[in-house]
Image (spheres, rainbow, N blue to C red):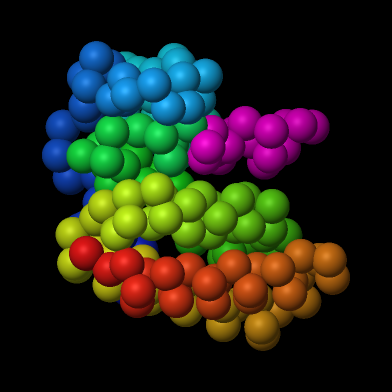
Amino acid sequence: MNTLRDAVSASFGQEKPPRATDLVISDGYDPFEKEDAAAFYGGKTWQDVLTHLQGLKNNPVYGAAYFLEEWSVLNPVHLGYYLRAHLEYLLETLASVAPDTAFVLHLLGELQQITHIHKRSPFTPEQTELLRQLAQHVYNFAAKHNLSAYQEHDIEEYATQLLVDLEANGS
């Protein structure tokens, strides 16, 4: 797992935080999500987002504030910067005693969604390859561990579909 964590650290979130005015592209699509994206991600570093996600562990609404839909509508140039927080949290939750399976499902779903929205992976070839490795890791984890019964199969399906999508729409 440390190898994946090191690869995430080296591949995502290395640049400076984006300016709030550059976070979204106003193109008439998803205006409410984009407003929410600018409100949540504006002025934050990827570390701030990770801290927010870590704080959800003890929150009774738990998954209501992942901000993954908002992340998916960010300017494609900035998706990788903030993806680091979500990937770091993914690896943390998979290593925990009680993984946040709802987060895992939502993240996989949004990664699939952005490959469809952009008709390709908006990430570099190296980042896309790392996402393939992470999807395979998630699939193996779900297949091996006793996750909540109603979600385990879905996680495997979502990870498989993400692998297919990244293969078909890789950068």
Q: Nearer the viewer, residue 53 or 66?
A: 66
Where residue 137 sits: x, y (%)? 48, 77
Q: Residue at x 32, y 67 (%)?
A: 169
Using the image as rendered, state which of residue 62 and residue 135 is in the foreground: 135
Residue pictured at 30% horizontal, 59% vertical: 120
Q: Residue at x 54, y 77 (%)?
A: 160
Residue 133, x across and y down, in percent:
38, 76
Q: Residue furthest left?
A: 15
Look at 45% across and 47% down and name the residue there. Answer: 86
What is the chief secondary structure element of the magenta stretch?
helix
Q: Nearer the viewer, residue 147 or 170?
A: 170
Task: Point out the residue furthest to the front here.
Answer: 28
Q: Is residue 27 above or below residue 46?
A: above
Quadrant of the drawing holding the C terminus: bottom left
Question: In the displayed structure, does residue 42 sit left or right of residue 162?
Answer: left
Point out the stretch of residues depicted in magenta.
53-69
Q: Nearer the viewer, residue 131 or 2?
A: 131
Q: Is residue 62 magenta?
A: yes
Q: What is the x, y in percent for residue 104?
A: 60, 57
Describe residue 151's horizontal placement relative to residue 169 as left or right. Answer: right
The image shows residue 145, relative to residue 84, as above or below, that is below
Q: Is residue 41 above or below residue 79?
A: above
